[in-house]
Image: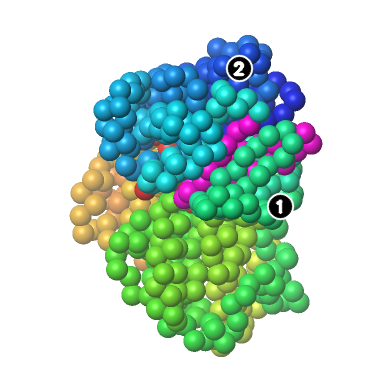
């Protein structure tokens, strides 16, 4: 989950590295560092605990460091607390090598003990330092940077994206990848590595994705890539069409708010190309109707908010296809001995396409013979590349740690997939299909009207940001929606929050409701409106203060019991969460704002979670 960037070229490296890191800070932000090969041959390293700005101030925006080749890193600590000394890059004892790393070297203890026996002195508590020290150890034997890297890679176990500098080879960076994202950027007389394409958008759009086991040698002349057997590999280059401006705040105070407001546009991009003459058409899907009909089991596997999309998907897919659908947390699926065979479909959902648990679940599913279809935002990401089929969400780069537009587009794609499956299986009611497709077309516009009322939510948040604990309750789709509302709130405002299926409250959790407890009661799903209302009455009777979310057509009825009502436009049942999630995102945002939280970079979290 750390951010990695590397540059070889003719310009001063440090300012470019800092700029790249500023786009990657969401991957981790407890410390940062850069290393450059200085013109007089040595490796110069500067690093600091804290946000990137601390480092940037320390080196005056990079002006203090002279080299034209360098590597940079922003850290999300795993081994060793955030501190100056544990920050990357790590340098070997003799000062010849500097290394940045994303991932975990699992056998670092054994290597460290070995090197200590050889007389090497370690500085940090990190697993990464063994790579720098081991490089120098092997280099002292073979005097060849590339060969020393090969020997290190054969010795280390675990996951890594590595960027490495050698003082004796001041014209190059060597990079290596296994189970952690790393891409190569091709410029004019300059080349790059990065853990994420957003770091490079300002400099180049021509990229290639490194595969596991590959090693790349970058100079100003070009990039040479080798496989694990050190044979040259011809890389396929991809042109990225994301705008550089998409990774900037564009006048908004936070990326999260910008991304909330980008949702209508993101939905248009996800939906319109797949709607043709009143039908859902996935031109980009290889799964045939015959194969869909032959499926015996369906799993949805994901983490975090993507998992919450899966929870909603279970309700809609089961309704539309009359097949049972199991939703699993990726970290659980992997070790659960899942019942998967050649007729199983595993739908994997991931914004980043790099979440390690999700990736591992995907590999487990494939090893057991399943067909894997993924719903992914980042084009060319590891999950996208390893899936049998991929449906992109086209949400554009998402920078805020708390996901918003990726969630919405994942949900729209999954809803459309459900409709397409229902049609292929002949299980969807024709009138419902037609009405839902019509409503899908109107969804971006309806979402705009929800956003237009953001000030109502801001006002409510300003009055209620001081609660210690907030509950979200709802039934069916509203329950799954509540899970996301609750997660958003706790991620960025640090308020304790729980989401409960309303009917389950009375089996224990209602004991936590007392005078003044805030309960967000979700009642958008018309079929269960009355039942949901009875649960609202129950919590009110115990003194809860209730904020209700419903649809315009039920606003008045709800106001009879609850004075504070937010309403979204009416739409097809299965699309209600797509509208309902927006007031919940805004509520979390404005509450966090009132509490003075660092909204785009909440404590302890990272956007792309590439460790187990
Ligand atoms: C992190 C992010 C969440 C995200 C989850 C899964 O925890 O903070 O917003 O839902 O990872 O990420 P993915 O990229 O696989 O959707």
Asked whether 584 falls inside the magenta stretch, the response is no
Task: Please provide the residue range marked out in magenta.
Answer: 172-195
Q: Name the residue under label 1.
A: 237
Q: Is mark 2 on a helix, strand or loop?
A: loop
- Mark 2, ligand 1, within 8 Å: the answer is no
Of badges 1 and 2, the one in the foreground is 2
Residue 161 coordinates in the image, percent (x, y): 50, 42
Q: Mark 2 points at which residue?
A: 41
Asked whether 194 falls inside the magenta stretch, the response is yes
Q: Which mark, by number, is residue 38?
A: none
User: Are the two marked residues, 1 and 2, in contact with CB atoms closer than 8 angstroms?
Assistant: no
Residue shown at 53% from the left, 34% from the top:
144
Q: Is residue 554 above or below residue 429?
A: above
**Depth check, front residue: 196 or 318:** 196
Label 1, residues with CA under 10 Å away: few <14, some 14-19, many ≥20 = some
Q: Is residue 85 above or below residue 524?
A: above
Residue shown at 38% from the left, 46% from the top:
158
Q: In this view, does 578 lie above or below 250?
A: below
For residue 93, side relative to residue 377 (left or right): left
Q: Distance between the residues labelled 1 and 2?
A: 32 Å
Residue 502 coordinates in the image, percent (x, y): 33, 59
Q: Residue furthest right?
A: 188
**Depth check, front residue: 128 or 278:** 128
Q: Is mark 1 on a helix, strand or loop?
A: loop
Residue 93 coordinates in the image, percent (x, y): 41, 20
Label 2, residues with CA under 10 Å away: few <14, some 14-19, many ≥20 = some
Q: Residue furthest front?
A: 142
Residue shown at 71% from the left, 53% from the top:
238
Q: In this view, does 267 lie above or below 340?
A: above
């Amino acid at each position: 989950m750390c951010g990695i960037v590397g540059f070889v070229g003719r310009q001063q490296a440090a300012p470019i590295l800092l700029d790249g890191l500023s786009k990657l800070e969401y991957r981790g932000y407890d410390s940062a560092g850069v290393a450059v090969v200085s013109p007089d041959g040595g490796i110069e390293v500067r690093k600091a605990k804290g946000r990137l700005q601390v480092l940037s101030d320390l080196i005056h925006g990079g002006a203090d460091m002279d080299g034209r080749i360098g590597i940079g890193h922003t850290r999300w600590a795993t081994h060793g607390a955030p501190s100056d000394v544990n920050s990357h890059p790590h340098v070997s004892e003799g000062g010849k090598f500097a290394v940045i790393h994303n991932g975990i070297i699992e056998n670092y203890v054994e290597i460290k003990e070995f090197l200590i026996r050889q007389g090497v002195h370690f500085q940090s508590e990190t697993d990464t330092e063994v790579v720098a020290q081991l490089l120098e150890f092997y280099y002292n034997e073979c005097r060849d940077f590339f060969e020393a890297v090969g020997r290190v890679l054969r010795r280390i176990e675990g996951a890594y994206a590595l960027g490495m500098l050698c003082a004796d080879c001041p014209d190059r960076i060597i990079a290596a990848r296994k189970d952690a994202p790393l891409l190569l950027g091709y410029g004019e007389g300059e080349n790059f590595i990065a853990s994420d394409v957003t770091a490079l958008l300002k400099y180049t759009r021509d990229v290639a994705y490194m595969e596991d086991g590959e090693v790349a040698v970058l100079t100003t002349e070009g990039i040479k890539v080798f496989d694990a057997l050190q044979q040259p590999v011809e890389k396929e280059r991809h042109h990225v069409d994301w705008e550089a401006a998409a990774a900037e705040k564009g006048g908004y105070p936070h990326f999260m708010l910008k991304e909330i407001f980008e949702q209508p546009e993101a939905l248009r991009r996800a939906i319109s190309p797949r709607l043709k003459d009143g039908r859902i058409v996935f031109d980009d899907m290889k799964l045939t109707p015959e194969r869909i009909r032959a499926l015996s089991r369906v799993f949805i596997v994901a983490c975090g908010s993507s998992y919450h999309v899966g929870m909603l998907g279970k309700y809609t897919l089961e309704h539309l296809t009359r097949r049972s659908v199991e939703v699993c947390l990726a970290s659980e699926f992997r070790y659960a001995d899942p019942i998967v065979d050649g007729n199983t479909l595993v739908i994997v959902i991931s914004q980043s396409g790099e979440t390690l648990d999700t990736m591992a679940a995907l590999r487990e599913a494939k090893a057991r013979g399943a067909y894997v279809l993924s719903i992914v935002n980042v084009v060319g990401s590891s999950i996208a590349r390893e899936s049998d089929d991929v449906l992109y969400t086209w949400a554009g780069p998402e920078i805020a740690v708390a996901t918003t537009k990726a969630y919405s587009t994942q949900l729209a794609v999954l809803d459309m997939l459900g409709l397409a499956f229902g049609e292929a299986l002949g299980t969807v009611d024709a009138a419902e299909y037609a009405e839902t497709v019509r409503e899908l077309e109107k969804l971006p516009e309806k979402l705009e009207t929800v956003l237009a009322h953001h000030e109502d939510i801001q006002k409510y948040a300003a009055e209620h940001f001081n609660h210690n604990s907030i509950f979200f309750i709802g039934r069916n789709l509203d329950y799954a929606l509540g899970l996301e509302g609750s997660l958003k709130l706790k991620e960025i405002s640090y308020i304790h929050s729980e989401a409960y299926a309303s009917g389950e409250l009375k089996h224990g959790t209602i004991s936590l409701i007392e005078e003044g407890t805030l309960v967000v009661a979700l009642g958008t799903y018309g079929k269960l409106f009355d039942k949901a209302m009875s649960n609202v009455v129950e919590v009110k009777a115990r003194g809860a203060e209730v904020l209700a979310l419903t649809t315009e057509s039920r606003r008045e009825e709800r106001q009879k019991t609850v004075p504070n009502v937010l309403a979204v436009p009416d739409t097809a049942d299965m699309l209600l969460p797509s509208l309902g999630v927006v007031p919940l995102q805004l509520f979390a945002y404005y509450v966090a704002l009132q509490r003075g939280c660092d909204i785009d970079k909440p404590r302890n979290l990272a956007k792309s979670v590439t460790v187990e």
